Amino acid sequence: MPSRNKRERRRANLRALLYLSPWLIGFSVFFLYPLLSTVYFSFQRYDLFTLEPVGLLNYKYFLQDEAAWTSIKNTLWLVVVMVPLRVLFGLGVSQLVTKLKSGQGIFRTIFYLPSLVPLVAGTLGFVFLLNPGTGPVQAILGAVGIHSPDWFGDPAWSKWGLTLLSLWSVGDLMVIFMAALLDVPKQLYEAASLDGATAWQQFTRITLPVIRPVLMFATVTGVIQTLQYFTQAMVAARVASGATDSAGSVFTPGYPDQSTLTFPEWLFQQGFRDFAMGYACVLALVLFVVSMIFTLILLRQFRGFAEEEA
Amino acid sequence: MTTTLAPQQVAHRPVTSANASKTRATLYWIAKHALAIALAIMFLGPLVFIGLTAVMSDHQALTSQLWPETWEWGNFADIFEKAPLLTWIRNTLLYSVLATVFMLLSSIPVAYALARFRFPGRKLAFLLVITTMMLPPQVVAVPVYLIWARFHLTGTLWPLIIPMLLGDAFSIFLLRQFLVTIPRDYSDAARVDGAGEFRTLVRVILPMAKPAIAAVALFQFFYCWNDYYGPLLYAGTNLDNWTLSLGLAAFRSVHRVQWNLTMAATMLAMAPVIIVFFFAQKVFIEGVKLSGVK
C-alpha cells in the first residue's frame, strides 16, 4: 500500500513538472541565467567585441557618473510626487463614481478609457496639448488670464507635464479601488451614521482601514512601475526637442536639460546606444536591488494570500 | 440618513425639516454630478482636441485655434503616403498576434498547475512568478540581448515573440488568480467520470475560465500593440522592422512640425484599442479587478 501511494505521488509530481516546464525553462533562460550573467559582466569592460576584466572600475565610475545621479534624482522625484498623487487622485475619482446614483457606468467608462490609450500616442497627444503656441491648454489658460508655462520645454515643468499625463491615465487604479470600495460592508456605514458619524469620520474610520491593503498594493506596484519609467519620458523628450534622426539612434534622452532623464533611460543609453555593456550591468544591479526591496514588501502581502487556497 | 431615524422621532419633526433634508440631498446630488461632469470633460478633452487637430489644415494646425476651419479628412490618407504606415501596422500585428497565441499556449498549463496541483515548492514557484512579474525587464536586459545577438536575431521582433512560448509571468499570475476561484467539485466530477487531468483542463476548466482567458489575451495583445521599449531595444535601428509605436514616436521628426498629421497618426494608433474596448469593456474591467489583491 505505501509503495503505491509513493508511486502515485511521484507521478503527480512529474505531471506538475510537465505542466510547469515552459515557465521553468523561461525562468532559467531569461531570468536566472541573465541575472547571474549581469553580475559577471558588471566586473568586465564589454562593447560586444572585446571582453576585458576591470575589477571594480565600473562600480567606481558609477559613483562619479553625474548623469546617472541626475537620472536617479529624476526617478526619485517621480516616485515621491507622481505615485502618491496618482493613488490619491485614483481614490478620489473612485469614491466619486461609487457615490453617483445615476450614470455610474458612463462615468466609469469615460474615466477608464484614457488608461487604454497607447503610451506613445498619449504622450504625443500631451506634448501637443501642452505645447506653447499651438496647444489648446495655453489657449484656454490664456483666455482666463493665466500664463501657461512651457511644460515640456522647461526643465522646471517637464516632470509636471509627465505627472499630468499619468493622472489622465489613472483608470486602472480607479477600477481596482472601485472594486474594493464596493466590497466594504454596507452595515458598517449604517451603524456609523446611527451613531452620528460624519461623512469624513466614516471615510477615515471605516473606508480607509478596510481598503488599506488595496491602497498599499497600488502604492507599492506604482513605485515598482515608476522605477521602470521609460516610454513616456523618452517620447516626450524626443518630440518636444524636435530631434530629427530617423534611425532612432542619435537622440540623447532627457530633454530639456536632462530634466526628464530617468534611470532606465540612462541604462538603455549606456548599454544599447553607447555599448558600455559592463557599466550598464552595474546600473541594472542597482535597479535590481531597489526593485527587489519593494517586491519583497509586496510578497509579504501575498504570502498569506497564496496560503488561503492550498 | 433619514432612514435610520426611529419612527417616533420622524413623527415629532416639523414638516419643514423634512423638506430641508430633501433639499440638502438634492444639492448633494447636483454637486456630485457636476463634479463628475467637470472631470469627464477633463478626461475626454485631450482625445477631443487630438481628434480636432487631426482634421485641421497644415496652416491652421500651427495656430492656437481650437476648432477646424475646414475639415481635412484627407489627412488620414496623407499619413499613409508620408510614412510606411502599412509596414508598421503589419509588423505590429505580427508581434501582437504571435505573442498572444504563444502566451496562451504556454501560460494556461502553468497557471493551472499553480492553482490546482499539490507538489513540493508550489508556494515558492508562485512567489517567483510574482517576483519576475514585478522586476523591471531592464534588470536582465544586457545578457538577454546578448543571447539574441548570438542567434543573429537582434534587429528583428523575434526576441520579443519567441520567449512567449515559455510563459508570461503577468498572464500566469492573472489566470492563476481566476482558476483558484473555480470550485474543485467540477474537476472532481469530471475525474469520477474517468477524465484524465489534461481532458479535465480542456473540457471542464477552460470553458469556465473563458472570461479570464479573454482578459489576459486582450491585455497581452494591447501590451504588444502599445509596446515601445521592446521594439526600440531590438528593432530600433532596423527601419524595416519598426512597429507603429516606434514610427509614431519618430513621426514628427520625419518631416517638419506637422501637428495635424502627427495627431492623425496618433488617432490611428488609438483607434483599435478604443474600438475593442467598447465591444469588450466588461472583459477589461474584470481583468483589471483580478490584477488587484483583495
Image (cartoon, coloured by chain):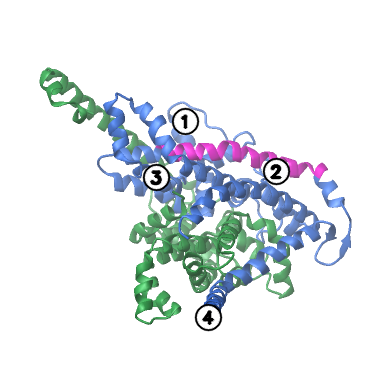
Chain colours: A blue, B green
Rendered location of residue B223, percent (x, y): 51, 60
The residue beneath circle 3 is A180
Residues tagged 3 and 1 counted as in contact (Cβ below 8 A) = no
Amino acid type shown at disc 4: Arg
Mark 2 closeness class: few <14, some 14–19, many ≥20 residues within 10 Å = many
Q: Which residues are magenta?
A: A63-92
Q: Chain of mark 3?
A: A
Q: Earlier in the sequence, mark 4 or mark 2?
A: 4
From this viewpoint, is residue A236 visible? Answer: no
Q: How many marks?
A: 4
How many other residues sit within 10 Å of disc 1, few (<14), some (14-19) or many (≥20)? few
Q: Is residue A148 above or below residue B53?
A: above
- Give me the C-alpha separation between circle 4 and circle 2: 61 Å
Label 2: which secondary element: helix
Asked if one can make out residue B160 in the rendered structure from this viewpoint, the answer is: yes
Label located before the other in sequence (3 or 2): 2
Of the two numbered discs 3 and 4 in the rendering, the one whose residue sits closer to the viewer: 4
